Image (spheres, grey):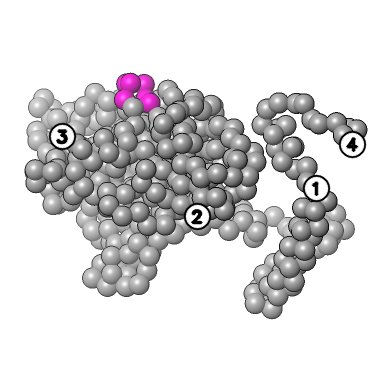
Amino acid sequence: MPRNEKPTANGPAADYARDRMVSRRRFLAGTVSLAGLAATTMMIPRLHAQEVKPPEDPMRVPGALPRPYGDRSPFVKSARVGGAGPGAPHGWGENAPNNFNSWTPLQDLHGIVTPSSLHFERHHNGVPLIDPARHRLLIHGLVNRPMIFSLDELERLPAVSRIAFLECSGNSHDLWLPNAPDFTVQDTHGLTSTSEWTGVKLSTLLEAVGVQRGASWMLAEGSDAAGMDRSVPLTDEVLQEAMICYGQNGEALRPEQGYPLRLFLPGYEGNINVKWLRRLKLGTAPFMTREETSKYTDLMPDGKAYQFSLVMEAKSVITSPSGRQQIHPGFHEIRGLAWSGRGRVTKAEVSVDGGRTWQPARLQEPILPKCHTRFLLPWRWNGQEAVLQSRCTDETGYVQPTRQELVKVRGTKSVFHYNAIQSWGVERDGRVRHIYA
């Protein structure tokens, strides 16, 4: 390209190329910065003696041998955050040391499928160690033929797989609060993940045991020390979609995700997808367990508690740029995730001015029902303050609400089912932070 000729191409690639064209002054300034970085980098081996040292030229050094179970590059540091016990982030203190969450690093992920090792966790009394050879699933109650299934027997039945999201009903629970701490997107939205789930359909097992007339609810019970149990309505949708899962992302369930068996109800709140599943009992009414009476109910402004609000409504969030990230003027691709427990996401929109105007974002394939959907929008930041937001619409026509709209109906006493529009404020220095707009 001649020295004085300006690029004329359009589109995100051209925008990025223009941003890469730097002046001699900027180059020299960058050189100084790199020199400082190099000096700092030289100190790292002394501070971290075990840090991996790659060869100068990997083409001249034989590579490592294959491992029995693959691992990621040591240079990739994405991790869940969370914990339990006194002093641990997101823990419940010394009175509940095994009651903990861990948040998925949504800001670091690509596509829609969450690696099993980064899938969010929610435990009420730790992760049990279960011998699959001894584990059994009992189905009884209002059935003609009570039956007990081993894992081997379940794996011999016709299998199904589907890609779907799972979300804790307490995801984004801190956003009910009136203040706005310096959250990351992992802090605000990290209790949701998407996986490919494999198992046997619930309807296959119910056909085997013979459901009696009047059976309209099912108690699902886990084998963990918390004795987790929840009532499941036997709606047409549940009978069509519910699965007893033994596989996740192509391999056996991780212990944290319910190995060897878990119930999976696409679109329903995470807690009812009972892990370490040991028993299904059919009955005529909800079983009113602790987890659906004193817990996992929505406290309304009038003081009444709304029960069995099981479906996770349409929700979206921008994952990049997002909280505590740093950006520079020029081209960026705004990226995020949208999902709905009622079906497919049909539209995602992005605002860069706090909701005054909206632009349609591109939905990246695949666009699946009850599944995370990736959305993208090219954006050139001019260095001025901006407020980034996203909202989505699902196939029922439901539009994700603003925080003001949600609070008007639900108040601020709730803990669960927060799905309002998330706002990220971009400051003049490029710092991104969580705000209420």
Q: Do the residues labelled 4 and 3 touch (CB within 8 Å)?
A: no
Residue 93: x and y in percent read 28, 69
Residue at x 15%, y 34% (from the top left corner): 217
Residue at x 77%, y 63% (from the top left corner): 32
In three-dimensional space, the C-alpha distance between marks 2 and 3, rounded to whole angstroms, equals: 45 Å
Q: Residue furthest right?
A: 2
Q: Give the range drawn in magenta.
A: 393-398
Task: Residue type at mark 2: give it.
Answer: Arg
Disc nearer the start of the sequence (4/3)? 4
Q: According to the image, label 2 marks what residue?
A: 324
In three-dimensional space, the C-alpha distance between marks 4 and 1, rounded to whole angstroms, equals: 12 Å
Crowding at dot 2, Cα within 10 Å, few <14 / some 14-19 / many 20+, comes out as some
Check residue 237 for magenta coloring: no
Q: Do the residues labelled 2 and 4 touch (CB within 8 Å)?
A: no
In three-dimensional space, the C-alpha distance between marks 2 and 1, rounded to whole angstroms, equals: 29 Å
Q: According to the image, label 3 marks what residue?
A: 217
Q: According to the image, label 4 marks what residue?
A: 3
Q: According to the image, label 1 marks what residue?
A: 23
Disc nearer the start of the sequence (2/1)? 1
Q: What element carries label 4?
A: loop
Task: Residue type at mark 4: give it.
Answer: Arg
Residue 14: x and y in percent read 72, 32
What's the magenta bit mostly, secondary-structure-wise? loop
In three-dimensional space, the C-alpha distance between marks 3 and 1, rounded to whole angstroms, equals: 69 Å
Disc nearer the start of the sequence (3/1)? 1
Disc nearer the start of the sequence (4/1)? 4
